[in-house]
Image (cartoon, helix red, strand yellow):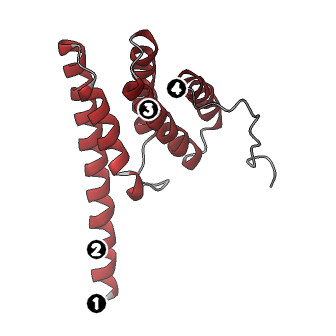
Amino acid sequence: MSQSGKFLLRQTHKQTTRDLNTLNREMALKMIMLACDTGDTEPLIEAVLALRKTEDLFNSHTTPIENAHIQKKLGDVLLSIGTNEVDMRALEHAILAYRSAITISSLLGEMDFREDVRKKYKLALKCAGQDDGQPTVSLMGAA
């Protein structure tokens, strides 16, 4: 394959990845609206899982910070449902959503946002009974 062919293929891949991210964000937002309309948590859980499916495509050039914000919002809603209705499935998916938001914010260097999400993540773990109470050591400042 020629150099120009490889370049065109890379450009097409980048654009397709951006398009996929956009479609997944739009679907997640529609699932949130559906959950609000129906009072059902299943669309929220499906939104978390759909956004997580694209994580293997993430890189600092194709992943907008909006993905992390949506994951955090999903985590917030699922945490609220999980604690208010004692719904372990909602809590488990809140944890997944927060993990995704932490990953994306780390990838993009959004450390203030990452720290905010980490606090919510720890709360979700505690509510789900998964917090061992041990302090965690961050290697972010070790280098």
Q: Residue at x 80, y 55 (%)?
A: 143
Q: Compare marks 3 and 1 and give the one earlier in the sequence.
A: 1
Given the image, on which type of amino acid does mark 4 rest?
Ala
Residue 84, above or below 88:
above
In this rendering, position of residue 14 left or right of residue 30: right
Given the image, on which type of amino acid does mark 1 rest?
Met
Q: Compare marks 4 and 1 and give the one earlier in the sequence.
A: 1
Q: Residue at x 51, y 39 (%)?
A: 99
When asked about the image quadrant of residue 39, the answer is top left
Q: Pick whichever, 41 or 133, lies toward us.
A: 133
> Contact, CB < 8 Å: mark 2 with mark 1?
yes
Mark 2 = which residue?
9
Mark 3 = which residue?
92
When asked about the image quadrant of residue 25, the answer is top left
Mark 1 = which residue?
1
Mark 4 = which residue?
128
In this rendering, position of residue 121 left or right of residue 48: right
